[in-house]
Image: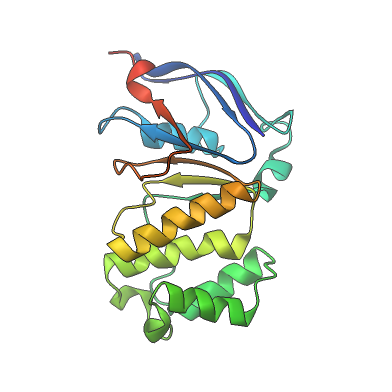
């Protein structure tokens, strides 16, 4: 379970948001909503232990993530709104790199099935720098299946996805939550998933 207690963040003298309390338990999906500049990416980075909040604490399974960051990082996948795949490596080389980095047990057969599902199989030996933005975003989302973590923290995961991939990703979120996983994501797109709980940042902004 991921818990936050009275999170706030200041940039200079300006308070971006304050008093945010989150309870993300297994089988739960939370969507962070709000206009551009409201602080969605900032909150995502705080939850990922990349930025330090001005006030408040974050707990993973009852332990402060500042005191036990290893346990926290071991259990979550963070997909940024910018791409992390290496542009001078092919799709398949990136996947093999991630597999080794995260000590993933994903099989070669599962990798092939994943690439086929996302219609990336015909590009698997193509360098990332020659792919379209949408194709790169699909590659980034492959990390969710490769890392096999309980907690997913995602910043604009729907960006660049076509209708087919959007539907596949929606099903992936549902399946992950039904299997005891947890998801918190920011997006301007509102997926038709009835179980999603909203976190509207306007309610916490210093407007």
Quadrant of the image for the N terminus? top right
Quadrant of the image for the C terminus? top left
- The image shows residue 141, relative to residue 114, as above or below, that is above
- The image shows residue 73, relative to residue 99, as above or below, that is above
Picture coordinates of residue 205, whole percent (x, y): 34, 17
Say which quarter of the image contains residue 41. top left
Horizontal relation, residue 180 to residue 183: left or right:
right
Residue 199 in view here: yes
Name the residue nearer the viewer: 13 or 31.
31
- The image shows residue 166, relative to residue 187, as above or below, that is below
Say which quarter of the image contains residue 140. bottom left
Outermost residue to the front: 194
Picture coordinates of residue 29, whole percent (x, y): 51, 39
The residue lying at 57 percent from left, 72 percent from top is 97
Picture coordinates of residue 36, whole percent (x, y): 25, 33
The residue lying at 37 percent from left, 80 percent from top is 127
- The image shows residue 172, relative to residue 206, as above or below, that is below
The residue lying at 42 percent from left, 86 percent from top is 125
Say which quarter of the image contains residue 189. top left
Name the residue nearer the viewer: 170 or 97.
170
Count of numbered circles in the view:
0
What is the basis of the colouring in this image? rainbow
The residue lying at 29 percent from left, 40 percent from top is 188
Picture coordinates of residue 192, whole percent (x, y): 36, 45
Residue 126 in view here: no
């Amino acid at each position: 379970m991921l818990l936050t207690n009275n999170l706030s963040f200041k940039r200079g003298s300006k308070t971006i948001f304050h008093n945010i309390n989150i309870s993300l338990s297994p089988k739960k999906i939370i969507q962070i909503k709000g206009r551009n500049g409201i602080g969605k990416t900032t909150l995502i980075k705080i939850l990922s232990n990349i930025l330090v909040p001005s006030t408040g604490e974050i707990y993973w399974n009852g332990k402060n993530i500042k005191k036990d960051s290893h346990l926290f990082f071991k259990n979550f996948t963070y997909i940024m709104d910018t791409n992390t795949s290496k542009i001078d490596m092919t799709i398949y080389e990136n996947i093999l790199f991630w597999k080794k980095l995260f000590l993933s047990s994903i099989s070669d057969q599962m990798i092939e099935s994943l690439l086929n599902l996302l219609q990336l199989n015909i590009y698997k030996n193509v360098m990332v720098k020659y792919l379209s933005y949408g194709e790169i975003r699909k590659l980034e989302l492959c990390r969710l299946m490769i890392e096999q973590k309980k907690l997913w923290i995602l910043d604009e995961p729907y960006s660049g996805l076509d209708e087919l991939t959007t539907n596949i990703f929606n099903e992936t979120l549902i399946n992950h939550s039904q299997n005891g996983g947890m998801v918190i994501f920011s997006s301007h797109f509102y997926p038709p998933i009835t179980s999603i709980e909203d976190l509207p940042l306007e309610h916490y902004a210093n407007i």
